[in-house]
Image (tube, rainbow, N blue to C red):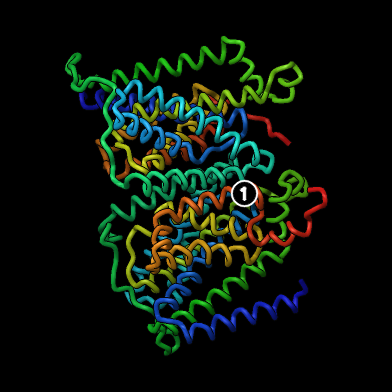
Amino acid sequence: MSARRHLAGLAVVLAALVIVALFLKRSDVYLLTLWAVYLMATMGLNLTAGYAGQMSLGQAAFFGIGAYIAALLLKASWPFLAVLPVAAIVCFVVGIVVGFPALRVQHHYLAFATLGFNVLAYLAMRNEEAITGGTFGISGIPRPTLFGVDLGGHLAYWYWTLGSLVVLGGLLWWLLRSPWGRAFTALRDNPIRAESLGINITAYTLLAFAIGAACAGIAGVYYASLVEFIEPGPFHFSTSLMMLLAVIVGGSGRFYGPALGTAIVILLPEFLRGSSVPWLKFMQVWYLAFFGIAVIVLMIWLPGGLLSLRERLDRKGGPQ
Amino acid sequence: MNDFIQLIVSGTATGTIYALAGLGFTLLWQASGTINFAQGEFVMLPAFIMLFCMMAGAPLWLAFLLTCAFAMLVLGAGFKKVIVDPLIHHGVIPLVIATLGVAMVLKTVVRAGYSAEAQQFPSSFPAGQFSLAGITISYADVGTLILAAAIVIALQVFVTRTMTGRAMQAVAQNTDAARTLGIDAKRMVLYTFLINAILATVTALLITPTYLAKFDMGESIGLKAFFAAIIGGFNQTRGALLGGVLIGILENLVGFYWSPAYKEGVALMLFLVVILWRPEGLLGTAEERKV
């Protein structure tokens, strides 16, 4: 796809997202905003899982750290734009601390380290009541007012989140096109060759992971301000799992993979929850079983994710 | 001091149970390169199958045997045939993702199809405790220790002393060379999957009386099984035993002297410390990289 067609396509989709929101119910705009928020985190995860080829099962922990930092600082009347770098930097540093021991040894250990870290972070959120409010959480988190514009309304906050998502996406796009970002892909495709070309695998993978963690921290800030109330539940390891599956299902290592995957993983269950049709009610309970089977089938038939479908069909008939 | 010794004894008992699950995990990894993220759910499902058998009137021992057969068929051979065989050549990540999918399916089937509540599970050992030199020890801990130790030793003897066991090891170390020597590599890999299924069922039998049977019980057990295996040394069978026991004991000590809330975090901390200090695990040997 040429760059011009790419930009035109993106502009059409963004314009549609802007206009459609005007005609949607308040709760649907909320869902769209939720999608954009989770997408910030899954785009960061795509950097680790898709481009650097490592599994992280702790994205929800960083998402939670960002959210709690936002809750505490926003309630202490910090400006929103000052909270963002704090959350990003804290998550980046924590990411380095968690990822370094694991990646230094065996890259597959990152999955275990992050999974364990998520368990620990969740315990801390539940038990450190003095800071996090324990299971009661923190309520009354304000939505920001920026440059004199009140972003408290659902439409205003949606546009603000969408705009931020585009900026974050642009930064990641630029990062991946830079020589530095191309090294990520090189080390996923052939780590040993990449190393022989002078790429320090461990350092690059660690950086990819920590940048991904920072993205989750930023997403957490938008999340806290969106829902205005946080408790440990959404930051459980199962959210990390869903985020990873969102990346994989959409198409890991493809820039728009997380956008599709997150829509499926986040919006579909919400849609089922809101429905009153009998067979959809049945699906509410069994949804995860079917989703799990779908993931297994996808891994067997289409390990590149849904966005690789066209390439797969193009190749069909020829040798695989 | 008595508290301390009691904590160590019961921690060792719990640790050997983690070791059993970790052992199966290690075996799968060695023989087929499979990282099974559904290992915890492989423990959870047999716990519920045993409950079903007992509700149908079977005594615990019969329920256990029936469940072993079921586990070997579904979690052993079936898992290998349906999930691992088609995916093994696609590299590690698709297979790992598929096992995460398996875990999700098993959890949902149990929660939606049976119950989200924790279920009581009978102990295999008599209730009560006895005193020895001022230390109170429960029969369950002693029974667990003896049974788990017997299984680990039996497995070790099987792997090192019998022809089949040595063939399995040969396949784990170098599949191509083993095949050249006329070993039926596929059959040996199948054996490891069957053994893993039995180990998971035994783990379920031993741990469910304390953990209770619940659809999400596997999350915590699976995590400790991974960490036990890595801490001890991923490529050593007895490593998982050491790793499991260390985790069991430290969890007990942290829970008692510091805070029960953070017991679950102990395994992670131990893991991070061990891989910083001895990356190949406490008993492991450094592995050459396969190009």
Q: Quadrant of the N terminus of chain A?
A: bottom right
What residue is drawn where x is 32% and y is 47%?
A: B116
Q: Which type of secondary structure does the marked residue at label 1 adopt?
A: helix
Q: Quadrant of residue A138?
A: bottom left
Residue at mark 1: A299
Question: From the viewer's perspective, is B139 left or right of B200?
Answer: left
What residue is drawn where x is 32% and y is 37%?
A: B213
- Residue A206, position as x, y percentages in the image: 59, 52
- Residue A167, position as x, y percentages in the image: 58, 75
Q: Quadrant of residue A142?
A: bottom left
**Outermost residue toward the right in this view:** A318
Which chain letter goes with mark 1? A
Q: Nearer the viewer, residue B95 or A227?
A: B95
Q: Residues within 10 Å of mark 1 (few under 14, many from 20)?
A: many
- Residue A59, position as x, y percentages in the image: 49, 56
Question: From the viewer's perspective, is A51 left or right of A45?
Answer: right
Above or below B68: residue A122? below
Q: Is residue A215 visible?
A: no
- Residue A318, position as x, y percentages in the image: 82, 51
Q: Nearer the viewer, residue A227 or A126?
A: A227
What residue is drawn where x is 32% and y is 28%?
A: B11
